């Protein structure tokens, strides 16, 4: 067994295995992300309906939209730890079922309090999904294949943004059984998640050894390649610091800030774009949805194009910084003209902030050791996604108190520029070639006798970077 794991994998078998893995799981993961993202952001299309039917104003709407991310942040790391304990198949199915149920419950909001509570619950239910998928890639794909797989997976959010407008706009026209269109929208889109979770249970496996659609030779090549990558990281590592000491690493804090800045801009645009589009003229819900799809359609093309260029011409930090500058310019320009010009500027900004979100993740993945990667990626994602709380909450407050969100757009532009500068201080490889951030061993740090023993008995059960 040890020879199988530690021998150099057959390149042809490894290539076949990686191709099969991507064909088997990526289409499903993209669909899952589409459904997930729609349930997260569909309230952007019902803001005016919530105000008319329930009296939920701009400030309350912004706070409720943002509370999703508080629940998400609190439960993100625990959820990812439980995924490692119970396996990706069972835990991802559980996540989908609970978020679908919470999304359906949004149809029965009665006022501000229930709106706040259900948005928080929806965030808690979804927690762990995104880092869980990243963790899954680390268990199934060698490092050379993860960047491309991540780009395809992340396109799910852009695809969701494209189709959520027309779909939600169409559902808003449904009326019957004493329910308004916005209630039918929540019920139907939430039920789609519950229906999909059954397929997830039967389609996914938690480990390559369980995949009957891989031959024994392909399984060996895949497991060996991932094991060898981890052993190379551990070559000079003697002691494994506790998870709490690792989380104070300055690089990890920098990763959190950069991703926070990206998420701040993404969700500032996501939750307020439909309202900005309505200022362009007398548009129906469906027409608003169609216009809403345009920036995200452009961003899909940009994500693939810049991912390809970053793969060909290295310097990941420079590419992320360029995307953040594009986002900053677009956000600033959206304040300088009328409603139509603002929409065009947001389309330009979307090229930057969506491409930046895809190009960012290879940086912490390259820096983090396998043994703490899953937990720290969950931490970066959860803290970063607090931008989803800050942006809509601030925008709602600004609109209710000043009648304009211009100050918020200036803030997004400035933050993107700061993040563009900060990204040049982010490391893409560990210090000194080690797989863990440099931390002084403490009394409670555990030292391993052999790297193989450590690789198979890590505190995080073999998460890969």
Image (spheres, grey):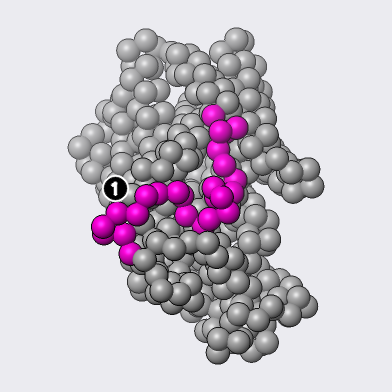
Q: Is residue 249 left or right of residue 443?
A: right
In the rendered view, would you say 384 is above or below 16?
A: above
Residue marked by disc 1: 74
Q: Is residue 95 left or right of residue 432?
A: left
Residue sitting at 58 percent across and 54 percent down? Answer: 433
Q: Position of residue 286 (x, y in %)?
A: 56, 38
The answer to whether 427 is drawn above or below residue 346 in the figure is below
- Residue plotted at (60% across, 72% down): 228
For residue 436: magenta?
Answer: yes
Q: Number of numbered discs present?
A: 1
Vertical arrangement, residue 74 with respect to residue 233, above or below: above
Based on the picture, tell me whether residue 282 belongs to the magenta stretch: no
Q: Looking at the image, can residue 182 be seen?
A: no
SS at badge 1: helix
Location of residue 318 with respect to 447 vertically, above or below: above
Task: Give the camera-side residue of 115 and 120.
Answer: 120
Q: Residue at x 42, y 66 (%)?
A: 92
**Residue at (60%, 10%) from the top-left corner?**
336
The image shows residue 249 at horizontal and vertical percentages of 41, 43
Which quadrant would the N terminus be assigned to in this image? bottom right
403 or 19: which is nearer to us?
Answer: 19
Q: Residues within 10 Å of mark 1 (few under 14, many from 20)?
A: some
The prevailing secondary structure element of the residues shown in magenta is loop
Estimate the x, y position of residue 65 in percent, counting from the top left: 36, 36
**Highlighted range, magenta:** 422-446
Decide which of 461, 452 is in the foreground and name it: 452
Residue 439 visible in this rendered orientation of the protein: yes
Most foreground residue, 405 or 127: 127
- Quadrant of the rendered structure where residue 453 is? bottom left
The percent coordinates of residue 203 (x first, y second) are: 53, 76
């Amino acid at each position: 067994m040890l020879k199988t794991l530690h021998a150099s994998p057959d390149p042809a078998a490894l290539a076949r295995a990686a191709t099969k893995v991507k064909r088997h799981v990526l289409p499903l993961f993209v669909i899952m992300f589409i459904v997930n993202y729609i349930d997260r952001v569909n309230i952007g299309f019902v803001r005016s309906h919530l105000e008319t039917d329930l009296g939920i104003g701009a400030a309350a709407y912004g706070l409720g939209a943002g509370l999703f991310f508080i629940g998400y942040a609190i439960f993100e790391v625990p959820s990812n730890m439980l995924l490692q304990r119970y396996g990706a198949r069972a835990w991802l199915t559980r996540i989908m079922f609970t978020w679908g149920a919470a999304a359906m419950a949004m149809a029965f909001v009665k006022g501000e309090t229930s709106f706040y509570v259900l948005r928080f619950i929806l965030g808690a239910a979804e927690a762990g999904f995104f880092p869980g998928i990243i963790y899954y890639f680390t268990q199934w794909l060698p490092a050379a294949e993860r960047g491309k797989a991540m780009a395809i997976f992340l396109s799910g959010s852009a695809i969701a943004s494209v189709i959520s407008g027309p779909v939600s706009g169409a559902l808003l026209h449904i009326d019957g059984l004493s329910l308004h269109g916005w209630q039918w929208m929540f019920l139907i889109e939430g039920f789609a998640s519950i229906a999909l979770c059954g397929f997830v249970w039967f389609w996914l496996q938690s480990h390559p050894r369980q995949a009957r659609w891989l031959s024994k030779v392909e399984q060996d090549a895949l497991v060996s390649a991932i094991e060898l990558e981890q052993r190379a990281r551990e070559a000079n590592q003697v002691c494994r610091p506790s998870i709490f000491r690792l989380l104070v690493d300055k690089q990890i804090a920098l990763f959190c800030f950069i991703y926070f800045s990206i998420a701040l801009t993404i969700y500032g645009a996501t939750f307020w774009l439909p309202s900005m589009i309505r200022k362009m003229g007398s548009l129906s819900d469906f027409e608003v949805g169609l216009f809403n799809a345009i920036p995200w359609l452009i961003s899909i093309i940009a994500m693939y194009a810049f991912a390809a260029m970053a793969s060909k011409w290295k310097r990941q930090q420079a590419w992320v910084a360029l995307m953040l500058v594009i986002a900053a310019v677009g956000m600033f320009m959206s304040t300088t003209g009328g409603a139509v010009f603002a929409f065009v500027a947001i389309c330009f900004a979307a090229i930057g902030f969506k491409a930046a979100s895809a190009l960012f993740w290879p940086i912490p993945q390259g820096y983090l050791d396998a043994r703490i990667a899953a937990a720290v990626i969950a931490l970066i994602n959860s803290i970063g996604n607090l931008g989803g709380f800050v942006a809509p909450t601030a925008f709602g407050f600004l609109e209710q108190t000043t009648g304009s969100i211009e100050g918020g757009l200036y803030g997004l532009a400035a933050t993107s520029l700061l993040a563009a500068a900060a990204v040049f201080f982010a490391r893409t490889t560990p210090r000194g070639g080690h797989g863990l951030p440099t931390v002084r061993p403490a009394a409670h740090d555990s030292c391993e006798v052999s790297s193989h023993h450590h690789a198979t008995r890590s505190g995080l059960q073999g998460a890969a970077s």
